[in-house]
Amino acid sequence: MRTATTRASIASGLLALAGGAAAQSSLTLFGVVDTTIAHGSGSIASRTQLASSGNQTSRIGLRGVEDLGGGLSAGFWLEGALTTDDGQGSASNSNNQPSGTGPAVAGRQGLAFGRRSTISLIAPWGEIRAGRDYVAHYRNRLEVDPFQNVGVGTIQPQVGSLGGTTSTRVSNFVGYYLPPDVGGIFGFAQYYLGENASDSAGKDDGSGASVRLGYAAGPWNVSVATGRTRFARTATTGDIQSSNLGLQYRVGPANLLFGYFVDKVDSATPVTGRGASLGTTIAVGAGEIKAALSNYRSDAGTRPETKKLSLGYVHNLSKRTAVYTTYARLRNSGGATTALNGSTTGPDRSSSGWDLGVRHNF
Amino acid sequence: MRTATTRASIASGLLALAGGAAAQSSLTLFGVVDTTIAHGSGSIASRTQLASSGNQTSRIGLRGVEDLGGGLSAGFWLEGALTTDDGQGSASNSNNQPSGTGPAVAGRQGLAFGRRSTISLIAPWGEIRAGRDYVAHYRNRLEVDPFQNVGVGTIQPQVGSLGGTTSTRVSNFVGYYLPPDVGGIFGFAQYYLGENASDSAGKDDGSGASVRLGYAAGPWNVSVATGRTRFARTATTGDIQSSNLGLQYRVGPANLLFGYFVDKVDSATPVTGRGASLGTTIAVGAGEIKAALSNYRSDAGTRPETKKLSLGYVHNLSKRTAVYTTYARLRNSGGATTALNGSTTGPDRSSSGWDLGVRHNF
Amino acid sequence: MRTATTRASIASGLLALAGGAAAQSSLTLFGVVDTTIAHGSGSIASRTQLASSGNQTSRIGLRGVEDLGGGLSAGFWLEGALTTDDGQGSASNSNNQPSGTGPAVAGRQGLAFGRRSTISLIAPWGEIRAGRDYVAHYRNRLEVDPFQNVGVGTIQPQVGSLGGTTSTRVSNFVGYYLPPDVGGIFGFAQYYLGENASDSAGKDDGSGASVRLGYAAGPWNVSVATGRTRFARTATTGDIQSSNLGLQYRVGPANLLFGYFVDKVDSATPVTGRGASLGTTIAVGAGEIKAALSNYRSDAGTRPETKKLSLGYVHNLSKRTAVYTTYARLRNSGGATTALNGSTTGPDRSSSGWDLGVRHNF
């Protein structure tokens, strides 16, 4: 594909494109390259890295939609994460169980479409979607996090969640998604499979269902979600139920965000994790200020808890390119040892970190 | 790359393309996203999965052709399989030997162009092609299979073949392909390398040659192929010779397909596998009916044999998008334990399975 | 993406592109497919392979630049190597240390952007670039090699270099690059991170800096570079300092190339490697002749040394497509066992090899 203004022209391809016959059909190649200096400091060790994804997850994707006529359309979406500091891809999970993400092989992870790999049939009454994508009970967590689960600032309920393998995404799901306009109501429901043989010990492991329902009216947006993934009960695991509530309120240039999160692990001795976050994003000129206070605590053993403060500023150089910086600090108690940006901290000690990076969308 | 009608506009790239100077030159990005619910049931265990590739193999590819003038052109083709239920790529084989496909690492297979990776010089007298692609003796098997070696319905000689590592594709080949119009004659010949050092014990392992020749006239199409891959003789392996015959006859909306297949493994005690298939594809309105009866049997030990019935229907929603369903049932004898869609069945027991999916080409 | 002249039309995508609003912005998909027959012969074993990258490294890439206004622009570059003989990608290195490139898994390496993965802010006063790319002290080695570190002909200081993990590329760097026109002066400086925890034994391992500075005037081009990577001292490793000098002189259709290279490994007993190369590229009609004499020797133990002669011819069928052949022969002394194209040769024995291939750019 030859562009008119290639900088360093190794390429010299010729490309002739047939324009789309139907205006509603499209094919889009897209991506994000986001690279950041990331420093973390803890009571035991600090670390400085050139890292990927401080503001948005670096990625490459291909998506398309085809108008089938009669109000029906077909779509697909393939999207995989990149680590732009070293050029690697990022793993997927094949079966919604810990065994479905193999051991890391340093330097050798190729591009996989682990962020999203879906096919859809879209009708006026909604969308049937299948493949791998966000699980419904993750969406509230994502939408009330001013840092969108990326970089050092991401709220603690994202990091500490006891939600297990299906905490963020699921493979092997079929879902129903409400259409965009149903009087302010939005949501979707998914059923997903662990794909085990019917005679295996953990035959239901990794299977589950999740549903999200919300309502938006004027400046308000409220949503609830719950999902349950099956795992055979042992001392350390069992069925996991993750539920949460998200609340958003827009006032002038600010968006106020509140979330409450509960994760119950039905192990031999059941464990419950609870978290909350209060955050905001505020548009200021060409930039955006972000802030959040959050915590997550478990009722297991010594009741470890981590409280976190996050502050960030994103300065847009254009609609596609931004420079940003984020600072975060956390305090552990109950024996927790959570640390930021690759640092290591002792039980009940604090940790801090910062990102300073550039993000470019294409 | 920004499209005029992007649905969920994360991307905002700008793209300026120079039209191809030569009309015969092109660069094409293409792919298939095919996701299916796949159920298999056997006497020991059943399994339900969201799977990829029930009608066509999910894939992504890039291919181009450049007009060099004087009747000569250059081309390349890079195509890799995807598993759209979890977003992974699919492995290649580097040396045409079992050692050339490393151990599977769950969730971590990145995109590789293992389906096809070729460069070509194309002249009026034919094409020289090199790299990785279908082996000649696989083409008859593919073309007489109404299910095209995809999904639960694929004919048994595809599944049971004793053809070994080079049963479907070979890496490291150089081939000569006849031009499209030679009075109905078609075919190609390949020589491929196992790439072992000249002082290694199995220095010829994975090297071989394969040739296919056919003739099409009116409604008839007949072709024969044979290929031989070298492997040092042991109790379980040795040179493998795969030969087959394909016959096609078009009558009205139907295409009748017949194949006969022989695979000889020259192990210490030689083993021969033989299979046959009789199938059809019938166009009906916007859809297509597919059916096949097939078997494959080995003369080793208890002479295991599997007989299979396959029925399918594909309903085209557009030229690019289809919904489909396939049903298959097989019967084992001679101790065979072949089972469908991830199920497990006991010796001489039957197994059945179905697919229900959506396929979208882009 | 549908082209007007697709040869084998599996694809039928529709694509509507919005032209770039700003002329200076672009997105480019590019690549190289280069496949060669590669034969090597040595005193112990010879080998014949279908290999990738005899003239240029096979690759696929995506790069873009966005005009931010005010003389500022943003850019990204993602580029990964392919092995077109089998369709695999190629590994990256995550931490500039041997542990950063995991064990090879045959047939399973997916596409990774290990050749280059960068984001840039470009201003009139220069470019800030971060990610993974060539290390500064590699550039002189690359530019004075008529064979560009590809194929059997590449000069011996490329192959034998004691420069270690950061000999060619580094991950996790931030660099400053001089703008294109500063009165003939060119160069860049990088600082890169091994990203270890501050309490680890080898906390500085893989971190370092590298700088290159050159001057071009009329037919002359001279440049020097030096880089130092930190590694904790052991019997076999320690800080590695690589320095070199490149000299180019253009006369008529010929480009004369000279390079001198020194690599110092500060192990318990320090080791120094020294090499030199004298080469040329000569344009002849539609083709190019390449030749080089080079050597590399280490002062360790028996002082192994390898001397190499390389001869090549590239015939351009178009601006994008070429056929080529290369012959090389080397002589070992001091116990060296270097061998060409996968062959094996005994101590102080010679080895020879040739490539015969096709290269296509898109």
Image (cartoon, coloured by chain):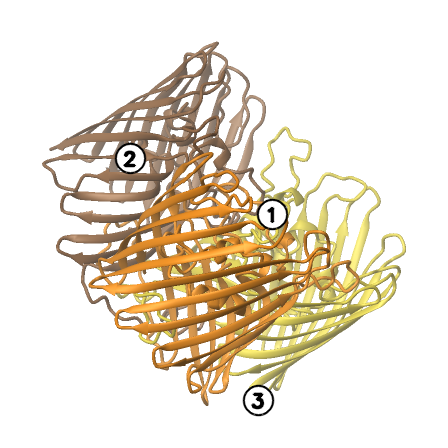
Chain colours: A orange, B yellow, C brown
- Respond whether the residues carrying marks 3 and 1 are from the same subunit: no
**Nearer the camera: disc 3 or disc 1:** 1
Residue at label 1?
Answer: A302
Q: Nearer the viewer, residue C257 or A218?
A: A218
> In the rendered view, does A19 fall on the left or right side of A115?
left
Quarter residue A266 falls in: bottom right
| Disc 2 element | strand
Chain ID, mark 2: C
Q: Nearer the viewer, residue B21 or A99?
A: A99
> In the rendered view, does B243 fall on the left or right side of C239?
right
- How many other residues sit within 10 Å of disc 1, few (<14), some (14-19) or many (≥20)? few
Identified by mark 2, the residue type is: Gln
Chain ID, mark 1: A
Residue at label 3?
Answer: B285
Residue at label 2?
Answer: C190
Q: CA distance from mark 2 to mark 3?
A: 64 Å
Is the C-beta separation of discs 1 and 2 under 8 Å?
A: no
Identified by mark 1, the residue type is: Thr
| Disc 1 element | loop
| Disc 3 element | loop
- Respond whether the residues carrying marks 2 and 3 are from the same subunit: no
**Nearer the camera: disc 1 or disc 2:** 1
Identified by mark 3, the residue type is: Gly
